[in-house]
Every structure is written in C-alpha cells, then in structure tokens.
Amino acid sequence: MEKNNRNIKNEIAEKLGDEVLRGSLGRFAEAYPAARAKAYENVADVDALREQVRQMKIATVAQIEKVADKFEAEAKKRGAQVFRAKDGDALKKYLLDLCQEKGVKRIVKSKSMASEEILLNHTLEDAGLHVKETDLGEWIISIAGHKPSHMVMPAIHLNRDQVAGYFSKELKQEISNDIPMMVQIARQNLRKEFLLADMGISGANFGIAENGAIGLVTNEGNARLVTTLPPIHVVIIGYEKLIPTIKDAAPILRTLPRNATGQLMTSYMTMTTGQTPLMVKQDGKWVEQAKELHIILLDNGRLQAAHDDKFKEIYQCVRCASCLNVCPIYTLVGGHVYGHIYAGGIGAILTALLNSQEDFDKINELCIGCRKCVEICPGKINIPGLIDELRSKTVKEKGLPFGVKAVLDNVLANRKVFHNLLRLASIGQKPFTTGNVIRHLPLFLAGMAKDRSLPAIADVPLRDRIAKITKQMVKPKKRIAFFAGCNTDFVFPETGEAVYKVLQNLKMEVVFPEDQSCCGKPLLGMGDRDIAKKIAKRNIIAFEEANADIILSSCPTCTETWHETYVDLFAEDAEWKARAEKLAHKFREFTSFVAEEYAKAGRLSPAAGNTKVTYHDSCHAKRGLGIYKEPRALLNATPGYQLVEMKDCDKCCGMAGAFGIKYTEISMPILKQKITNIKNSGAEIVAVGCPACMMQLQGGLDKQAPNITVKHIAQLLADKIKD
Amino acid sequence: MKKVCKNWKQAFPADNIGAALFPEFEKRAQGAAAEVFRVKTAVEAQEIVANLAKFTNAKKAVIANSPLQDAAGINKKLQEMDIAVYTDVADIAEHAESADIGISTIEFGIAESGSVCMDGYAFESRLVSMLPPLHIAFMNTSNVVLGITEAFEIISKVYDNGYISFITGPSRTSDIERVLTIGVHGPSRFVVIAIDEEVVGGSI
C-alpha cells in the first residue's frame, strides 16, 4: 500500500501546474486518435477484430488454471523451469535465491510492468545486485528515481532538458539536450550492460500454452538482447497474459501496436521457448551452451480476479495503455497521481486488484465515466463499469462517510423531502453563477458541493407546470409516460415543456407520474447500491401504474440507468428484475424516438437553413446508448439550421456527477477545450440531447462565449411548432 | 545452423501468399523506415550489398549463411572489397558487436504490416540482426503473406521450440518527448533485398 497521508488535491494541483507534463500530454492526446485511426486503415472490421481479442480472452480466463497448467507443462518439456509466485515476496525470494545460487552479479531488464508492480528493482539493488533497465524510457525514470507515468511511454512526463540533466548526473559528464545524441549515449552505455550481464529479466506480452513460448513486442530491440545475450533468462509473466494457442497471438499483435503507438507492428516482435543456444566465452574460447530459462508466473491477486464474475474482465487487457491516451483526466494530470504503478482507468482497476483496494479508494474518483476508453479498448473492457464495481465494493465494505450516508438516506430516498428541499433551494438560491452549476443535483444535497454556489433551480419545477402544458388527446397514437429526471424537472423545466410540445404535436398522449424521483445514478456513482435500489423500486412502481405504451426521457443518463442499471441492480431478485426489464423494454430516449416518429411521418427529410448549429454528443448517449445519428438527422431536418460539426464532438464536457464539483480544477480545463471547439465550429447554437451537458456547457459559454447559446434538441424542435 | 523449421515453405498456405502481395509489403515496410530493394536475379543483389558496404565504409561483416545469399555470392564479393567476413558462429559471437554489417535471410514477409519473419533459433542469426548498425535481410519476393493472421497460421504449423522474430524497420524509440529516433539498441538501418528468382533450396 502507498503512504496513507496522500493529499490527492495537492498532487493534482502540482501536476496541473507542471507545464512540461501538460504540454507533452496535451500534444500526445491531440495526435493520438488520428495516429491510431491511420494504423487501422488496412483492417476491414476493427470491431470484429476487437471482438476476436475479447472472445479469446474470455474463453481463456474461464479455464485459466488449465491454460496455466498446459503452459507450465509445455515450457518444462522444453527445458524451462517454471515457478508460480503467489505474490511479490515469493517472486523476490525465488529470484534472489537464484541469483545467489548462480553467482549472478549483473542483470539487464527489459520492460516488465509486473516487476514494477512488486517494486522488484529495489529488492534486487538492496541485495547488492547491479540492475539496469534497458528500455530507454525505463532507464530514464530509473536514474531519475521516478515511477512510470504511462505504461507504454514511462518517461512522457519529462522533457529533453530534464532527461539531459539526469543523464549528466548518472554518467558524471555534461550531456547536451540533443535527443539523437542522448539516444546514442544510452545505446553505448547500455550495450556494455547487455554484453556483461549474467542474467536477463524480461516481461511478456503474451505466453502461449500450446508450446510454452512467450512473446515480446518492443521498438528499441532491448528485449531481443535481454533474451539473447545473458546466459540466464528470467521471464516474469502475469496469468492474464496467457493465451491457449500460437494462433491466438495474432489478434493481440494486430491490435496491441496499433492501439499503443499507432504502429502496424512494433520494430520487433520476439517469441522464444525452450533453452535456446548461446555462445559463451570460456578460457578465451567461444563454446555453445543451452540458455537457462526460468519462467515466473505471477499471481498477486490475478487468480482471485479470474474467479470473480465481474473482475475477470481485466484478463481482456493487453496492456496497450490506449485507455490512458483518450482519458480526459489522464491526459491532464498524467500517471503519477494514480499512486501506485498502473495509471489511468485500467490502472486504477489494476491497482485495486493487484495492489490494494485502499490505494484505489484514494483515486477512485479520477474517472468521469465518459467511456472514451471503452470505445477503443482492444479487449472491449468496460473500464468505467469496473470502477463503479470497485466503488460499490468499498461502500459495501466500509459504507459511505456518515454525513453523506445520512443525507442520502433521509433526503434522497424520500422523494417528498428531496423535492421540498429543491423547492426551498429555488427560493434561497443566489444569482445564477456561471461555471458553478452542478450536474447531478442530489450530490449538492449530499454535501459534496463544498464551496460551490447553488445550482440554478427553476422557480416553478416541471411537475408544477404539467397541468398547464398537458393537452387532452382524442384517440392518441401512443400513451407516453415522461420520466423527467432531476435536471429537467427542477433546473430546465423548459426542456420538459418542449418535450411535451413535440410529442403532443405527434398526437401522443403524455403523462407525468407524480411519484417519480431521481433515477439514482448519482448514488451509483458513489457506490451506494442499497439506497439506489430503494429509489429504483419507487420509480418502477410509479411507472407501472402509469400504464403507458412508451416511457420516455430527454436525459440519456436516466435512460441508460433505466435500461441497464435497474436490471443489473436486481440481478439477484427475480421479481424486481422482471419488473425492471419489462419497463426497460418500453423506455426510450427522446431524440431517437422522435427521429423514428418523424421518419414515419415523412418529417425527417433534410431542410435548408443559415443558422449554424453544432451538436455535442453526451457520453451516455453516444457510447452508452449508441445514439448519435438520430439527433443529427433531426437537426438536419429542422428548417432554418445548418449543422456544422465541431472538433471532438463526442468528448466529455467535463462535469460528470460528483467529479466536476470535487475536482473543479480538472473539470474546468476540459470544459474550456470544449468551449474552444464550439467557438471554432462557427456555430451560434450548441444543440445537446442531455440536460446535464446543457448545464455544464451553459456555465462555460456564459463566461467564454456569451453570444453562443445552448439548447436541448427538444427546444429547437418545439420552436418550429406553431402553438 | 539450428532452425525452428528446416523447410518453412512446406507450411506456406496455398492462398494469400505470393509476389502479388510484394508491393503492399514494400509500402508498409518503407512506412516503418525499412529500405527495400527488389531485384530479378540473385546476382543483382550482390551489387546492392556491395554498394551498401561501400557507402557505409564497412570494414567488417557478420553473416548467417543461406543458399539465397550464396547464390548472390555476397561473401566472396565483400571479401574482394577487403571487408572481413565472419560466418562461423564463434567468429560471429566474437565480432558481431564491432561489425558494421549483419546479413541474414528471413522466411517470409507480411504485407499487412511490412514485417519480416525471421527464424532466430540459431544464436548467430540473432546476433547478426541485432548488434551491427546495419542489418541486410534477404528474402524471396514471392514469400509474402497477406497478414499477421496468415503469418501465425504458418508459425503455428512449425513452431515447437526456439526463437522467432518479426522485424519491422530499424530499431527506434520515442521515449524522449515522443520524438522518433532511429537506432537505439538494434540496427539503425534495416535493408530488405527481395529476389524474384527462385533459388534452389532458397530461403533456408
């Protein structure tokens, strides 16, 4: 476990103020998506390829012991010695004993995150061994005394001047900051190390059960030298890297380099099994001998994860670190704030499972659930989903802080109390202050807002306007029960009114079940499933009683919560699960439903217009519900508007739930970039399909681009309907 | 020389392989900063090697022999240029580190990624491709497979024991400021010479 007195806020502030880090991460984040896309240009079906990786890995973890046994047997058959290390201590003991027995003094290492995970180098050095990392980035951070800040580019937080400084100190001579020169100096220095080493330690990108081979990808070629020159080779491999057959390496190698570095293949891909021959000089003569090969299979929490229904998903990770490259948080703060060794979303999960849950708890909030990572992960890992699981594990074991728990129990779980408080807030609130609005209202009530001003609560909530806006329908086409969600009900009732107008214009009857409350998503984000269940049940009852053909929401987050989370919540409660599923089938998101109905009515053909409007994809709509074409079709069909796309239209606006409030300093740069992209699009209006994004964007626009307005698509459609 | 497989060609598939795939292989290999020469006959390859040796001012070459290279007569040619040529495993072990050129023959190319697949079971085949600053790889033009998937279909048939590598361009790093720099631990130049002519016993 890491030290307990970490002040994450201070660490973040320091990283945000680190211009070298911000600059290089910013440039990288900018360049990465295009580089990756280019690398996949000759892959016909990227999604099918990712699915191939996923399926292969799922099948493997389901029989991990069998695969490991086979791997061990095949490796042994070819002369390797295989040791299964329960944890870091066991591994270290094996290795130190081996070094002593063989008289090993000098070791060269090629990159192994597993060895970093157990802080192996410290142990080896403390035992008096001469240990050199040979991957350039790893060598740099090892002489700098840093931890890796990225799994693939460990020294991305340093610039050439800093590297030159560390080189000068290490080599005790003045080294200039010329990059090619520094690379040559590293080559010369490390070449000696390779030639003199008694032992090479490598990691493995995969281990093949079929013939006991391990595979390594590198660009520098250091892994080839580590596995070739020293007379002893030690492989440290985690169970999650095992694959059943030789052919199974293909999908990994088709995705890993493309995702990691935008390369079709790394410069070197090396596979080795058995005791390969090498030449050693004895008494001035070169003689051939068989290499001594030791393979250490590291458990350290991996096998437990393999047998967990949810967490076995980490076996789908190929360690390409692409999830870091697209993470709005990682690309701002870098890897070190994640505490242990693994960074980013997947890093947070690995830290929890392979290091300690306590270390995860400290940084669990550094995921905004935007799912950019899920979209590109070669193994299709639901990283935000696993982080939610870990959060709920902590809450289940330790509970929420007392004050927060009390508020949630007494306020949120009780609709009337909650809504009364919201009404009171509308009376007592301060003037609307930009940049200070809060995405999920209940969190404010949960005391998470701290020094933020109140959100702008509407004078009259939607629920009190229903009687006025409801039209009586004779023979309606459908009966729709509207689920407003907190934001539409209490902050943007106009959006709710617009929804009513659009649906009623389609000859639909719209009803508003009075007993509806918050969908519960904010609670789930905090890991409290018990209260979320209570709220879910109440909402389910309210909408069962509404007896509607369709349930509809203009909030994608609420929609997704109904679609998936409610069903998941009651996974072990057959009755409630069935009830939740029944309603989930009826539940529709506004833009996709209306686009469908407009298409049926012949109202979805493109229309001309001059007012430029750009569309911001909400994370939950785009990556949760897969809805991004429909809102655009609606905008294209609305007379008077011209749709223009902004850069990174589907990148998170930066204020997911508690995150934007607790970590304003991270949320604001994300928002600022979003506003810049909106401005550069030349649009006068930003259309959104999500009231939560609307709240965040409104705050940002007021401050940075007051002449641009943000509107929910429902409003843009309603504006064109005559009363 | 020890090999993972004495006759890789036996494992080649009937489809998705052939000289028609060479242009795509060439493009992708060049995209990874490999230098690619295609010649009709083995004899023409000799001149390319001679020129490379001349322009790099080479004094010493370490060579893992193959029938394809023999057909090109490169060892003799280099010796005529007063270049020290080492082909014995012990000599290679002694001299690879200080050699200017390493030469070997690879089994096949991969069009998808511009990689070549090398049978690296023999210690000397690895040294010649790793330690000198210039690695020249011989191949047959027709030995190009479509993709990584096809490559692994071949490998899965022959790979029981030993060492296999893909090589895709020269050694590189972007570890300082993400600036691409060629030639870290491996060669800074990777040259592929593809020969159209089928040499008997070639590509072994």
Image (cartoon, rainbow, N blue to C red):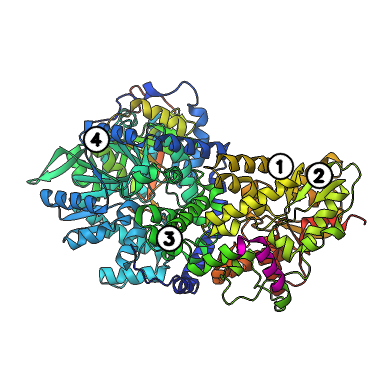
Snapshot quadrant of residue A240: top left
Look at 30% across and 71% down and name the residue there: A168
Look at 41% across and 59% down and name the residue there: B175
Q: What element carries label 3?
A: helix
Please check whether the numbered discs 4 and 3 fall on a single chain.
yes
Callout 4 crowding tier (Cα within 10 Å): few <14, some 14–19, many ≥20:
many
Pointer 4 and pointer 1: residues touching (CB < 8 Å)?
no
Q: Who is closer to the viewer here, A85 or A588?
A: A588
Please check whether the numbered discs 1 and 2 fall on a single chain.
yes
Q: Position of residue A481 (x, y in %)?
A: 76, 49
Q: Where is residue A493 in the image (x, y as percent from the top left)?
A: 77, 63
Q: Mark 3, chain letter?
A: A
Residue corresponding to mark 2: A479
Residue corresponding to mark 3: A398
Amino acid tagged 2: Arg
Q: Is residue A329 above or below residue B170?
A: below
